[in-house]
Image (cartoon, coloured by chain):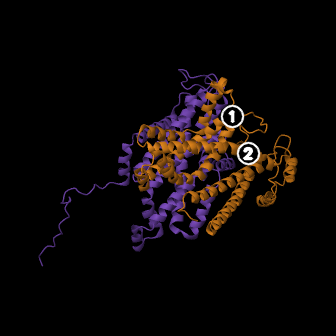
Chain colours: A orange, B purple
Amino acid sequence: MTRGTLIYIGQRIGLIVVTLLVVSFGVFAAVHSIPGNAFISEHLHGQDLKDVLHQFGLDRPIPVQYWDYLRNVVHGDFGQSFVIQGQDITPLVLRELSVSMELGGSALIITVGMGMLFGVLAAIRQNTWVDYTLTTFAVIGYSVPSFVIATLGILVFGLWLQDLTGGTVYYKIAWDGTYGTIGELWLPAVALGLYTSGQVTRITRAAMLDVIQQDYIRTARAKGLPSRVVTLRHALRNALVPVTSILGPLVVTIIAGSVIIENIFGIPGLGKEFVRSITAHDYNITVAVFTLYAALIGVANLAVDLVYTAIDPRIRY
Amino acid sequence: MATAITAPPLPQQEYAGGTVAREQVSLWVDAWRRLRRNKLALIAVFYLGLLVVMAIVALFWTPYNPNKLGVCDTYATPSGAHPFGCDESGRDSLSRLMVGTQVSLIVGLGTAFMVLVVGVTVGLVAGFFRGAVDSVISLIINIFYGIPTLLVALVLYTLLGPGLLNIMIAISATVWMDMARLVRGQTLSLREREFVEAARASGARSGKIIFGHIFPNALGPIIVQATFVIPIAILTSAFLSFLGLGVPPPQADWGGMASEGVAAIRFVTHIVMFPSIALSITLLAFNFFGDGLRDAFDPRQKR
């Protein structure tokens, strides 16, 4: 690792910090400006409501509240839930993050694995029925909304084939703290990953077609290397570069998709929590989840760019 | 001085050496010729045309009142009188599906228009003026790329309150960056070209150069990008509706209908089926159309 690389990493981390500050303040200001609040009810109104708001400091100007919030965050305290009495947010969010990471990670593996396999197959069988089938499948993949795929899956595997699967595609409503097993997780992960796999297929196919025409591939073939070796070791390695470049946006798309998928399957992850918190005015959770996702995306993008230099030595920072 | 001044002979109408030169065609004619060869894109255009007709018909006529409760039995399966069945409130699903077309098309086209205006303006400004302006705009674009899109739309829509226009604003806020980045890149490369230099040398002002010279030359990729915004916007609005944050009831829209159908999936499947199919085929059509358009406008680009 050269000095230039270190400076580059430093700059990127700086950008991530700036992003997190801007984003968290934006969300903070936005959710606090949504009309209504978490405490309003039949039993609590008038002066009593004002007292409760004052107790939580919610009657102060938004920048002041944000500054207070930020000070607590620096000490690792994301505040308390307004809706669930006495629930600290930090452990709640961390637990839900582990669930979402498990789902999102599985989806990422499915999406990259399937996408690259299909992309390579389509490229080496260019303009045959294999190619046409796989590219059409890719377009269908990113045209059919994930909730449609999820619903179809629930219908087929959860209801019609209930005897075979035992209907395990639903999570229990009250999550008891264990991670989802592969039996429970595969359908949500496929429903989540199918959308992005179409994009990976297209990028891989285009990149492979580009690489296959180049001279060194012809040289490798002329030397008598088996086509499997040429495809996997010579062509695919260079086709990886453009595929890597969309990994960052892929993470963003998977996070967005997981909000839908978690709500359909009742998976107790960050996405489900986010939707609940925003409709319940549970501000602290909304801000925490949002900022956490922004941090995750920032780190993922940085990691992708560093991997980039590793697989393509021409790129230097 | 009686010699009359004769006009110089008119240039000959036809090129004397025969018609060697390629016939001059505009960008549009050229693109249309290539698009016509793409069967998949043509089918998509045909389907989308039907969809527009359906949306317009639904303005004046639907088989039943789409919002009237109890026009048939709740959860009634498809029959002759109600070909697409009925939902959990006894509303006719076909009527609601037809009205839902309007929502999808308005959200798709409206968002694409907003993204077009914002993205093109921002991109042109950043690319043309470069320097500090570009740095600030690029930083903003980068920040927007670093946040999960659907969450932004959710927060923004909750903040703005229910309504069709607010849905479009919320979605535009999450997808404008691609357009801005594309236009910025195009502008950066076009502003160095000779014809821009010539325009500048002949005294054209910045505004004239930007909108008279750079923008028209970037039009092809801009249109393609705008076309791809439409399915994304329709999809995102369906997601919002699915999470219960869509157009306010009783207005029918496909995402909301699918969401109602999922709740009833243990009893009947037709409620979730029809809006899901409609949504999928429409998104597929827009994507095929966008692909065809991209190939038509930029034949050099590899697929």
Q: Position of residue A194 (x, y in %)?
A: 58, 40
Quarter where residue B257 is shown: top right
Q: How many marks?
A: 2
Q: Residue furthest left?
A: B2
A158 and B14: which is toward the camera: A158
Q: Chain of mark 2?
A: A
Residues packed near mark 1 inside 10 Å, few (<14), some (14 to 19) or many (20 plus): some
Q: Is residue B107 visible?
A: no
Q: Position of residue B146 (x, y in %)?
A: 64, 55
Residue hosting label 2: A98
Is residue A33 visible in this depiction of the protein? yes
Q: Which quarter of the picture shows residue B23? A: bottom left
What amino acid is at disc 1?
Answer: Glu
Return the residue nearer the eye: A197 or A67. A197
Circle 2 residues within 10 Å: few <14, some 14–19, many ≥20: some
Same chain under badges 1 and 2? The reply is yes
Residue at disc 1, secondary structure = helix
At a point 73% along the width and 46% down the height, the residue shown is: A97
For the point 58% across and 58% down, which residue is it? A310
Q: Is residue A27 toward the left or the right of residue B76 in the image?
A: right
Residue type for callout 2: Ser
Task: From this view, report whether residue B76 is shown above or below residue A87.
Answer: above
Say which element carries label 2. Answer: helix
- Disc assigned to residue A307: none
The residue indicated by pointer 1 is: A184
Left or right of A113 on screen, residue A227: left
Q: Is residue B236 above or below residue A299?
A: above
Q: Residue placed at 61% from the left, 32% from the top?
A: A153
Please, which chain is the residue tagged with disc 1 on? A
Which is more toward the observer, A248 or B292?
A: A248
